Structures are given as structure tokens and as C-alpha cells.
Image (tube, grey):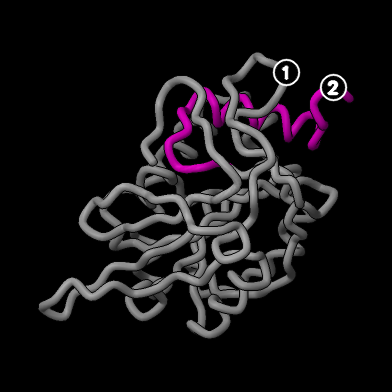
Amino acid sequence: MRGRAGAITVGLGVVLSACAGGVAATEGSSPASTGPTASADVITPGEGGYSGLVLEHPVPLVDFTLTDQHGRPYRFADRAREASLTLLAFGYTHCPDICPGTMAQLAIALRELPPEVASKVEVVFVTVDPERDTPEALRDWIAHFDERFSALSGPDRKIVRLQRSLGIRPATREDLGGGQYAMNHWAAVLAFTPDGLAHVTFPFGMTVEQLGHDIVELVRRGFVEEGTG
């Protein structure tokens, strides 16, 4: 699924990224097997709602500890409690398009927002390829986007367990031959608000303007259902 400037219509499946050689993201076969489900179409900013996907069943924040790009323990729940909005993404540094595209869009969106909003947002990237993505590799990669972002790694079994605990199908490896491989993984970003829930996800392909709109709304008001705020 490629982003467009206008609205993007999706059903109850969620987006799974096929990051092999620039393959476009595809829709999962069923909500239960792929991840959090969406209850509404994506809409454009200014229409009384969110540009991201509003989840029928919000995803509870999971308490986990991994190692950040500086080799330090990163306790997700503790850091999320200190922020007004925590954006959680999964991916890997060898991804040719979706992962760097998502991080770049988030970095640009935050730079264009008022400092009092951007400073309250925590961006967290968790690798699904810890075999190659050491803390050092993650530090070099994430610095291309924003050094304030946190990039996390850890034991593969722990990262698999984390994905499952969030209702996301764990990433799988795709053999490319010649000792090379790609990772197929969930491609959206979970947006956790101070109530400890992710009510909204940002699918790959959202514009900088759409991301900025949702980030401002979620930071300033928290999640508000359409028609109640």
C-alpha cells in the first residue's frame, strides 16, 4: 500500500510490510493473524477526526526493557509515562524503503511542529533483525533521521514475544539468496497516549501534514472520539 495525499481507505486488515527489494506493503489476511484492527477509513486532516487508523480495540501499552543505541537499558513503560505521546515502530536498518521512509516522515513532521508539542513526543524504533542490528548499527542508522529517537535491540525471542503481546504477527525472514535476507514485518506505528493505550496507528504512506495533524491532536488533547471533543 503506497501513501497518497488524500484519504486512504482500508478494511479490517492491517498493513504488513514486505521490505524485500522495495516490495510494496500488502494487507494481511485477517485481523487476528496480523495485528491491531482498524474500525474506520483513514480521513484527511480537518474533517473532525484522525488521519491515522482508529482502532476498534485499543492496544494496551506493554512494559518491556530492551537495549538502546547507546547500549543502555530502555524501559518502555517508564519512558512512556514521561511523554504525552509515544510512537512505537518496528523495522530493521537494511529495509530499503518502508522503514527509512517512516522514520524520515516522523522526523520531518516533528521538526515542523511547535517545540512545545514536539518535545512531548517519544519516538521508539524496535528492530526485528537483532542479528544484524546491534546497538552500534542502530546508532548510526537512527542518526540519519533524528538522534533524539530511541532505537532498540535485544534477544530475538524477546522481540518476538513483544510483537505477540501487542497483537502483531512476528516478523519473518525472507531468503534473498547469496546469504542475504529481508524481514517481513508489521509496518504501522502505534501511538500511545497517557491513558496507556494506542487508539490510533499511523500506516505507512501518511504525509508529513497528516502525521503532524494527528500528533498535535494527540499531544494536546489525548485521544478523543469523534463527536465527543
Q: Quadrant of the C terminus?
A: top right
Q: Quadrant of residue 183?
A: bottom left
Q: Find disc 2 in the rendering and name its residue.
A: 227
SS assignment at label 2? loop
Residue sitting nearer the eye, 205 or 209: 205
The magenta span reads 202-229
Number of marks in picture: 2
Residue 104's x, y, as percent? 40, 40
Taking the spot 45% from the left edge, 32% from the top edge, the residue there is 108
| For residue 172, side relative to residue 47 (left or right) | left
Find the distance from the CA under tag 1 to the CA under tag 2.
8 Å
Q: Find disc 1 in the rendering and name its residue.
A: 48
Q: Quadrant of residue 162?
A: bottom right
Asked if marks 1 and 2 touch (Cβ < 8 Å), the reply is yes
Residue 224's x, y, as percent? 82, 32
Q: Count neighbours of disc 1 (C-alpha within 10 A) and say few if under 14, some if 14 to 19, many if 20 or more.
A: few
* Whether residue 32 is situated above or below residue 22 in the rendered picture: below
| For residue 25, side relative to residue 53 (left or right) | left
Q: Which residue in the rendered view is the most extreme toward the right?
A: 228
Is residue 210 one of those drawn in magenta? yes
| For residue 202, side relative to residue 135 (left or right) | right
Amino acid under label 2? Gly
